[in-house]
Amino acid sequence: MGMNSESLWLGGMREPVRLAMLAFTGSAVLLYLWIIGNALLFEDAIDMFDMIRPKGRFVVLAMLVSLTGAILLASIYFSDTRGAIEQKSDGFFDIVSLVTSRLSMIMVAGIVLVMLYEVVSRYVFARPTLWANELSLWIAGFVFLFAGQYAMQQRSHIRIYVIYDMMPRWMQKTADVLSLNLLLFFTFALVWGGYSDAMRRMMRMETFGTAWDPPLPGTLKPAILIIILLVTIQAISNLIADWNKAPEHHSPAGDIDETEIDKIRKTLGT
């Protein structure tokens, strides 16, 4: 997705955020190299089991703080630019959804790196890991949730326009309000029914019950409730932002991504 360089919301803070992102990224890389070197020299070296149980290990805590800071600042920095096929941000909650969309983008790259590490470790060095599959599942769960929020912000979720486009504007607004109320009811029912279970799993940080034993249930169950709330807030933001806009008419031609077609043509030399 091509990105333009015009600042959307950071303004003068864009450069400080970029420098802080680079500082945290450099710190994370140096700490990772230190951990790798330590693993080659000492038998009781830090491993992936320690990375989710950092108590008493300053290096692990520093590594997690650096990595978290790098990812969050990168998400903020990249949310300050708009992709060629992205809609213009005009809702009060759009920036939050753009930040989480960049976070999910970085997470997808993380999954690729984890699986690449597993393939090389398994088939080149005959030393498969106990954690790569579970870590990729853990990350993918958050990617799936944040992708729903981004789809709502971009109005790219599944919608059937055959009847909607035939309605007058006042009826379209009525349909939009009805859709929002259905989403509000769904969110209320989900939070009402799942809050106790999610809190119980989170408070005891329930684990996956495997050799690596990451706290997937203890993190993903609360995340489902939190992110569905974010999706609902984004839907409210969309309704407010679109309320006074002129009616849109949709056709199959509107789904064609001309930017990607141009890139394909340049690649093929046509």
Image (cartoon, grey):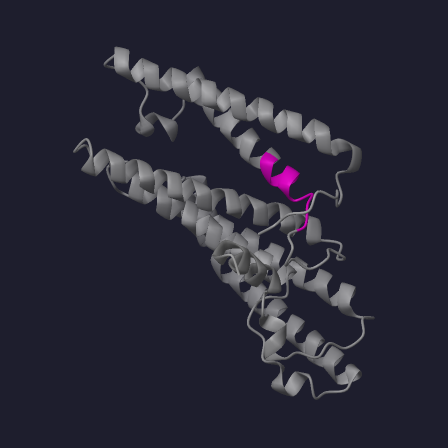
Residue 78 appears in the rendering: yes
- Relative placement, left or right, of 258 versus 206 is right
Q: Residue at x 77, y 63 (%)?
A: 241
Residue 56 appears in the rendering: no
Above or below, 36 against 79 in this view is: above
Residues in magenta, as a range: 74-82
Total marks shown come to: 0
Q: Position of residue 2 (x, y in %)?
A: 61, 50
Q: Position of residue 134 (x, y in %)?
A: 32, 43
Q: Residue at x 47, y 27 (%)?
A: 64
* Residue in the foreground of this view, choosing between 261 and 195: 261
Above or below, 158 against 88 in this view is: below
- Relative placement, left or right, of 237 versus 63 is right
* Residue in the foreground of this view, choosing between 252 and 19: 252
Q: Residue at x 73, y 67 (%)?
A: 239
* Residue in the foreground of this view, choosing between 81 and 258: 258
Q: Position of residue 240 (x, y in %)?
A: 77, 65
- Relative placement, left or right, of 91 versus 205 is right
Residue 81 is a magenta residue: yes
Q: Position of residue 184 (x, y in %)?
A: 63, 67
- Relative placement, left or right, of 24 versus 197 is right
* Residue in the foreground of this view, choosing between 226 and 3: 3
Q: Residue at x 58, y 80 (%)?
A: 160
Residue 231 is a magenta residue: no
Q: Residue furthest top?
A: 41
Residue 149 picture quarter = bottom right
Q: Residue furthest left?
A: 126
Above or below, 242 against 267 in this view is: below
Above or below, 104 against 147 in this view is: above
Q: Residue furthest front?
A: 270
Q: Residue furthest right?
A: 244
